[in-house]
Image (tube, rainbow, N blue to C red):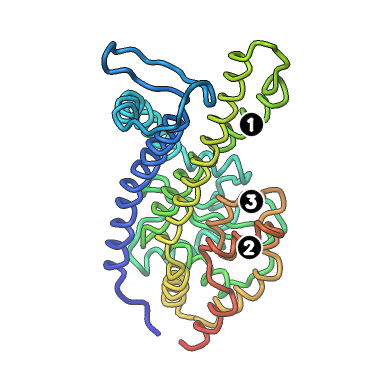
Amino acid sequence: MRYVGIQSQISRNNMKSMLLLIAFPVILLGMAWVFLAIITYLGADYYDQVDGNYYMNQVGVNYEPQLNIDTVNWTFTKIAPFIIGGVVIWFCIAYFSNTKMIQRATGAQPLMRRENPRVYNIVENLCMACGMDMPKVNVIDDPQLNAFASGIDKNSYTVTVTTGLLDRLDDRELAGVIGHELTHIRNRDTRLLITSIIFVGIITTVLSLVVRMIYNRMLFGGFSSSNDRNEKGNGLSVIAIMVIGAICAGIAWLFVSLTRFAISRKREFMADAGGAELCGDPMALASALRKISNNPGLGDVEREDIAQMYIIHPKKMAQGLMQFLSGLFATHPSTEERIRILEQF
């Protein structure tokens, strides 16, 4: 098995990144339209085109549910610019500050050549072999075995390793792992992955906020004992709107999570093949994967968005239903399969 078609892989990943950039706003705006359609149908509000005023109805108060497309479209045109603007600002901040965010989340520190010439020599030699610019090298003081690549351009590309990895792997195995991470950078996998992480993070944050609002409303005033029917109706309407919002946000989260399949599991096989070719020793990378699989991850970092970047995903992070969902949306193939293919080189 030879690692071929790197330019095709780069072009494919660049195209997927663009598709994600287009698909995410479409999904978000689509769910916003659905949300407005549902609350309009249930009578939460409507726009009177005759007098140009915006009114609120109460379900069950001389009102029969109906869908007014004109109302939905009118409201949608008013809020769509704010949604797009918010997403653009959020995305830009996260996209261009992702390196610092990852460093803070993992506790990674820059590694100087004088501190560990062994690692620097390996990275430098592999970069010279494939004709790529030298990325930054970070180290995390953690006994677990882990490595990942990150960054969106040559100024932010970084290879991060743990002290546990440096202590447990010999030079051959370490070269295989670093070659794997350098291949992720060469293939633009890191850019595609970070784009996906940001999009899923936006939806997850919105969903969390809506759920928290529902909880606070129910706990501190969702079921008022007021004798005023109108006030009570309004209170219940607010809760109903929040529940509908949570459902729509949840559906959007599902669709956006499915975009992780755009980051094909084949990217790990491609990176394995590229790492094996760079270091010239497929069995060394296979040996490294065996060692890492016994203790992958980071001790103090249990974030799925960070775990997606690991060379081996620490599946112990997920339990029960989350483990099942993690399997459905997994971005890593099984380690056993990866080792089996490497052994066939």
Q: Is residue 116 left or right of residue 342?
A: right
Contact, CB < 8 Å: mark 2 with mark 1?
no
Crowding at dot 2, Cα within 10 Å, few <14 / some 14-19 / many 20+, comes out as few
Amino acid at circle 3:
Ile
Crowding at dot 3, Cα within 10 Å, few <14 / some 14-19 / many 20+, comes out as many
Foreground pick, 45 / 16 = 45
Foreground pick, 306 / 321 = 321
Q: Nearer the viewer, mark 2 or mark 3?
A: 2
Which numbered disc, 2 or 3, marks the residue that appears first in the sequence?
A: 3
* Residue at x 40% of width, y 29% of height: 86
Foreground pick, 34 / 14 = 34
Whole-percent x and y of residue 45?
A: 43, 22
Tally of marks = 3
Whole-percent x and y of residue 8?
A: 27, 68
Q: Is residue 267 left or right of residue 70?
A: right
Read off the residue under disc 2.
Answer: 324
Whole-percent x and y of residue 283?
A: 54, 83
3D distance between C-alphas at marks 2 and 1: 25 Å
Amino acid at circle 2:
Phe
Helix, strand or loop at label 3? It is strand
Helix, strand or loop at label 2? It is helix
- Please tell me the numbered disc located at residue 140: 3
* Residue at x 53% of width, y 53% of height: 113
3D distance between C-alphas at marks 1 and 3: 34 Å
Whole-percent x and y of residue 271?
A: 44, 69
Amino acid at circle 1:
Arg
Read off the residue under disc 1.
Answer: 212
